[in-house]
Amino acid sequence: MDPVGDVHAAKLNARHWLLVIILDVLVLAELTAAMYVAAAHPDDFTPVFMKTFFGMLLPTLLLGFLVKRIVRTPAERIKS
């Protein structure tokens, strides 16, 4: 067992955990915003909701993917 490696893995897990929490909060905020915008257009609720929500969700997921790659350590980059 490598105690230094275990500490490093714990920090890495904390970074990934924090990234997941931030992305979850962003997705919930986007869902709330999309519901708010769509509620202003009750006749076209579904199309307005879909355009608004997915218009915000896709860039957020892309950004999350890129940040996850940046947060990785050099040792993880070699493994993958």
Image (cartoon, helix red, strand yellow):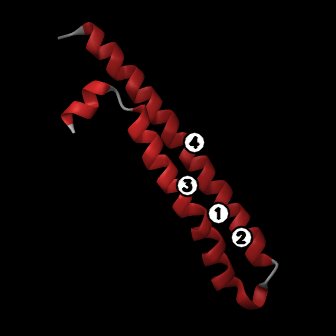
Mark positioned earlier in the residue sequence (2 or 4):
4
Spatial CA distance of label 1 from label 3 is 12 Å
Amino acid carrying mark 1 in the image: Leu
User: Does 50 sit above or below residue 32?
Assistant: below
Numbered disc 1: secondary structure: helix
Amino acid carrying mark 3 in the image: Thr
Q: For mark 1, what is the residue?
A: 31
Q: Quadrant of residue 70?
A: top left
Contact between marks 2 and 1 (CB within 8 A): the answer is yes
Amino acid carrying mark 4 in the image: Ile
x 61%, y 63%: residue = 56
Marker disc for residue 35:
2
Mark positioned earlier in the residue sequence (3 or 4):
4
| Within-10-Å neighbours for mark 3: few <14, some 14–19, many 20+ | some
**How far from the left and from the top, in percent, is residue 13?**
39, 29
Mark positioned earlier in the residue sequence (1 or 3):
1
Numbered disc 3: secondary structure: helix
Q: Residue furthest bottom?
A: 43
Numbered disc 4: secondary structure: helix
Spatial CA distance of label 2 from label 4 is 20 Å
Q: For mark 3, what is the residue?
A: 60
Spatial CA distance of label 3 from label 2 is 17 Å
Spatial CA distance of label 3 from label 4 is 10 Å
Contact between marks 1 and 3 (CB within 8 A): the answer is no
